[in-house]
Amino acid sequence: MKARFRRPLFFPVVLLCFLLFSSLPAQADTGPKPSVQVEFTESVGETYYATLLSRESSTGPQSAYDPDYPESAQYPEGQKDIWQAFVDYEDPDGFYFLQWFWECTQTDLLDWNYFPPQEFKILVFYPETGEYRASGVYERYAFDSTFTVDLSQPGELQAVQGYDYQGELVSLVLRAAITILLELGIALLFGYRTGRQLLLLAAANLVTQLLLNLALARLFFTPLPLSAWYVLLELFIFCGEALLYSCLLQKLGPCTRKPHPVLYALTANAASFLGGLGLAEIIPQIF
């Protein structure tokens, strides 16, 4: 049994490795990714902008402006004055402005969901008065770090940690539902159509989605990049599902086509991975 399983599994593993790693350079930031959200309260309708100042001069995609290289300037069209105001701010501790900022007047929300700095200060700028308000030093404390700042309090900005459990739960449920529907659709094409077979596939996908998200949350602060962990975990999930399906699918009912449980596991996992990359671009809020 073991010898028969290893041989058909070898080439699908190599193919899945190729698919995952070939998509990694261009899409290494998709799928589950860390974020920092700052919600401002008591803003009283005054126009204001906000950013995070970073202890490091770059997080990868975002970097501080270098006046020796004018082409390094990055700002939205029509926002040069606001960008310049943040560039001109001199932090006493040497933190850097990474050229990302948000107008928060209507939303009262700063949502940095693309390589946010690990250690940062919150900086608010009021263009009507030219006033700056800054916080002390904070760090990302979770995969998704959320803070609340009361702007009515005088002096240095004070941020209170929080966590959007409801939002995370909704996102997890939506991701799991999309993955299960996609892989069940592929199962029908492979001839797995009995209720017990589909129930096994749905249960396996639900469990692996939960384990994947829990693992990514725990591996967030390890030296290995999160995108690399994501690929390794996907490979581990594929191998586990291929073994499970090889052992159980045919026992739970007939297959209307020649059974290929390992090829199904490969196709389903590759489709869900690549589908996740596309959905992360279309609906980034659920990732």
Image (tube, rainbow, N blue to C red):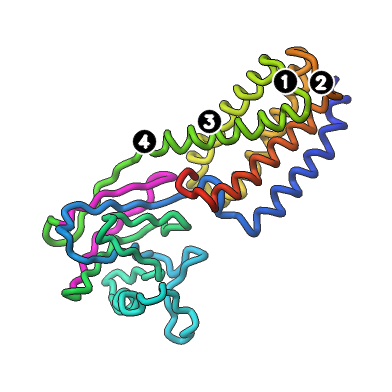
Q: Are marks 3 and 4 in contact (CB under 8 Å)?
A: no
Where does label 2 land, which residue? Answer: 256
Disc 3: CA contacts within 10 A as few (<14), some (14-19) or many (>=20): few
Compared with residue 31, is residue 106 higher up or lower down, i.e. above or below? below
Tell me the quarter of the picture where residue 54 sits. bottom left
Judged from the image, the secondary structure of the residue bearing numbered disc 4 is helix
Query: Which numbered disc flags the more N-terminal residue, 3 or 2?
Result: 3
Marks 3 and 4, how far apart at CA = 15 Å
Query: Which numbered disc flags the more N-terminal residue, 2 or 1?
Result: 1
Marks 3 and 1, how far apart at CA = 25 Å
Marks 3 and 2, how far apart at CA = 31 Å
For residue 210, the mark is: 3
Q: Are marks 2 and 1 in contact (CB under 8 Å)?
A: yes
Task: Classify residue 20 as left or right of residue 172.
Answer: right
Q: Nearer the viewer, mark 2 or mark 4?
A: 2
Query: Which numbered disc flags the more N-terminal residue, 3 or 1?
Result: 1
Q: Are marks 3 and 1 in contact (CB under 8 Å)?
A: no
Q: Nearer the viewer, residue 179 or 131?
A: 179
Q: Nearer the viewer, mark 3 or mark 2?
A: 2
Disc 4: CA contacts within 10 A as few (<14), some (14-19) or many (>=20): few
Which residue lies at the image location 68% right of the left edge and 31% below the top edge?
Answer: 185
Task: Report if residue 146 lies within the magenta region.
Answer: yes
Q: Are marks 2 and 4 in contact (CB under 8 Å)?
A: no
For residue 68, the mark is: none
